[in-house]
Amino acid sequence: MKTTNRLSIHFKVRVEREKDGKAPVYMGLTVNGSKCYIALKSLQVDLAHWDIAKGSGRCNTKQGRKITEYLDDVRLIIKEHYRQLEIKGHRVTTEALKDAFLGNVNEEKLITFNDLVAYHNEQAITLLSEGTMKHYYVTQRYLTKFFQKKFNRDNINLIDLDYKFIADFELFLYNHKPKDHQKPMDTNGVLKHLIRLKKMVNLAVNLKWIPANPFLGFKMSRKKVDKEFLNEWELKSIETKQFDIERLNLVKDIFIFACYTGLAYVDMINLKPENIVIGLDGERWIRTFRQKTLVPVNTPILPKAMEIIDRYRNNIRAEANGTIFPVISNQKLNSYLKEIADHTGIQKNLTFHVARHTFATTITLSNGVPIETVSKMLGHTKLATTQIYARVLEKKISEDMLLLKSKLQHL
């Protein structure tokens, strides 16, 4: 097997520990620049038969030649341990060689990273959405590619996970050049894979499969990115646009509905008539759960959203599926949104998730709805997640300054 490990072995006598003309011999091991020393307790040499310059027994004495033969045997033992570590898929280190030589190796089956992946996926598949699981599968494929490049195999033992492993994987992700049309990963793309790896590693720590968390002290940075959203004029241009193509009208209605409810694609497309309820205020509400996190979502239905619901009340395709809207894939929906952007002159990258951002920013926060209320309606588990939408818009600045002008005039 091809390996990048470099092993060197040498021997030295600890002259300062000489007693009655004899001194102990230590074996020095170096693997990829990492060093350690092992005391050869069964060997005490007479300094008269030791060649300090060569680090072996003197060749001109019988006792010296016997010492050299013994050291040659030790050297062969170390090389065999080295070979066995590679065959068994262990990472070769000075500590691993030392443990093998001293007989400190536990021969029980070591838990591998693939064992962790299998257990994680078995548990997560019942808790996470299909879309979220797909992201984990992508991260796991990148890890396999990293194993192949770094260790020349498809799997490693969990005990080989350390801080350096995390740092090397991060660098691998940054340097990875996709062979298809995809762009190289940016900071946030790398971060998502590291977050998924960290969650799997935390599971291994909790299961006591690894003694320490390799992420301890590892800092992960996020690049601040403004979430794309539609301002009120862009939103109005889509609302008032009528298309000759029926599929574009359907996509427009679904998109506008999401702009006024904040629902994610999977929650919107699975919305059923029973999810429309009468709230304590006597008004109609959407009551459902986010498929991604199973967090409850309770949102009052704004008039514009109610108009769209009424428009599809007797839709044959929707009734066949038992849903409020006809089912359309997220991929097709996003593709048709590009056409809508072209027809309405919107220069932004229009995707369905822009609707959720528009609800958070243009519809609610910029109109004075408290961020805590917006967070509840979006189904966020942390207020910090909602705060990425809390930008000060030009409209809000203008309104605040007009209020200030009015106050100053009265003064």
Image: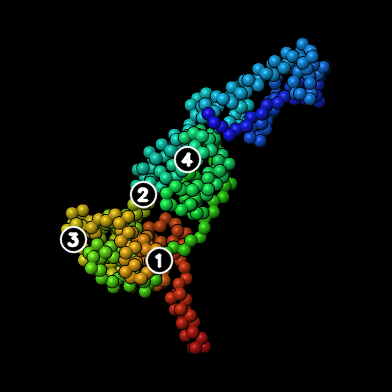
Q: Residues within 10 Å of mark 1 (few under 14, many from 20)?
A: some
Q: Position of residue 367 (x, y in %)?
A: 40, 72
Q: In the image, which disc is placed on residue 267?
A: none
The answer to whether marks 4 and 2 mark residues whose Cβ atoms lie closer than 8 Å is no
Q: Residue 237 versus residue 345: which sits nearer the camera?
A: 345
- The type of residue carrying mark 4 is Lys
Q: Is residue 16 above or below residue 224?
A: above
The answer to whether marks 3 and 2 mark residues whose Cβ atoms lie closer than 8 Å is no
Q: Which residue position is annotated with label 4?
A: 145
Lower sequence index among marks 4 and 3: 4
Comparing labels 1 and 3, the label whose residue is closer to the camera: 1
Lower sequence index among marks 1 and 4: 4
**How far separated are the C-alphas under marks 1 and 4?**
35 Å
Q: Which residue position is annotated with label 1?
A: 348
Q: Which residue position is annotated with label 3?
A: 315
Seen at 73% across and 13% down, the residue is 66
Q: Which residue position is annotated with label 2?
A: 131
Q: Secondary structure at mark 3?
A: loop
